[in-house]
Amino acid sequence: MPEREQAIKTFKAMAETHVRSMQDAFGATLCYDEGSIFLLDDLIARKGITPEDENFQVIVLTAGSYLGEAFIRVLGGRWEYDDELEWVVEIGGERISPFSLIIRQFTKTDSTHISDVYTDLKERLEKGE
């Protein structure tokens, strides 16, 4: 298993890189809040990246790190390593892969948006499910 503390430091640094790149590319100010999570769907759609782009993996890492950090700061939880999913955010007993969500959003493998996943999770947490 990768060293947890080092991985978390890396995710935090990559999240900040994503915040800066969205500011530079689109003039969008991302915070680690609900509004910024909702904005992420639009920014990804505007970015127009595909898996064939040479920067795809870096963008997935930075955007996924940002999304994971935003989920943690808004909903609680922590980064955990999962043998199947690799790095996930564990919130209320659920494990979510922010990197998989970002890939799905870029590749449009389903119609679920990041904001839908967030809203669904938030509602389940509020109900205590």
Image (cartoon, rainbow, N blue to C red):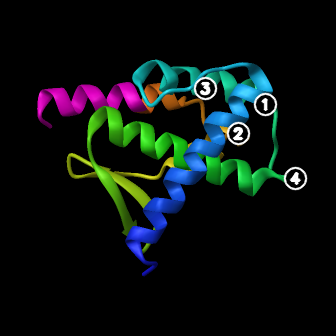
Q: Is residue 82 visible?
A: no
Q: CA distance from mark 4 to mark 1?
A: 14 Å
Estimate how packed mark 1 is, as few (under 14), some (14 to 19) or many (20 or more) residues with alpha carbons within 10 Å.
Answer: few
The answer to whether 11 appears left or right of 17 in the picture is left
Viewer-closest of 68 and 8: 8
Q: Which residues are magenta?
A: 118-129
| C-beta proximity under 8 Å, tags 1 and 2 | yes
Q: CA distance from mark 3 to mark 2?
A: 9 Å
Residue 127 sits above or below residue 90 on the image: above
Give the mark nearest the N terminus, 4 or 3.
Answer: 3
Give the mark nearest the N terminus, 4 or 2.
Answer: 4
* Residue type, mark 3 in image: Asp
Q: Is residue 110 visible?
A: yes
* Residue type, mark 4 in image: Glu
- Give the quadrant of residue 101: top right
Q: Identify the residue at horizontal 50%, vertical 47% (top origin).
A: 98
Q: Is residue 128 magenta?
A: yes
Instruction: Give the prevailing secondary structure in the magenta stretch.
Output: helix
Q: Which mark is residue 52?
A: 4
Q: Which residue is mark 3?
A: 41
* Residue type, mark 2 in image: Phe
Q: Which mark is residue 106?
A: 2
Q: Which mark is residue 112?
A: none
Estimate how packed mark 3 is, as few (under 14), some (14 to 19) or many (20 or more) residues with alpha carbons within 10 Å.
Answer: some
Q: Which residue is mark 1?
A: 47
Residue 87 sits above or below residue 83 on the image: above
Q: Position of residue 117 (x, y in %)?
A: 43, 33
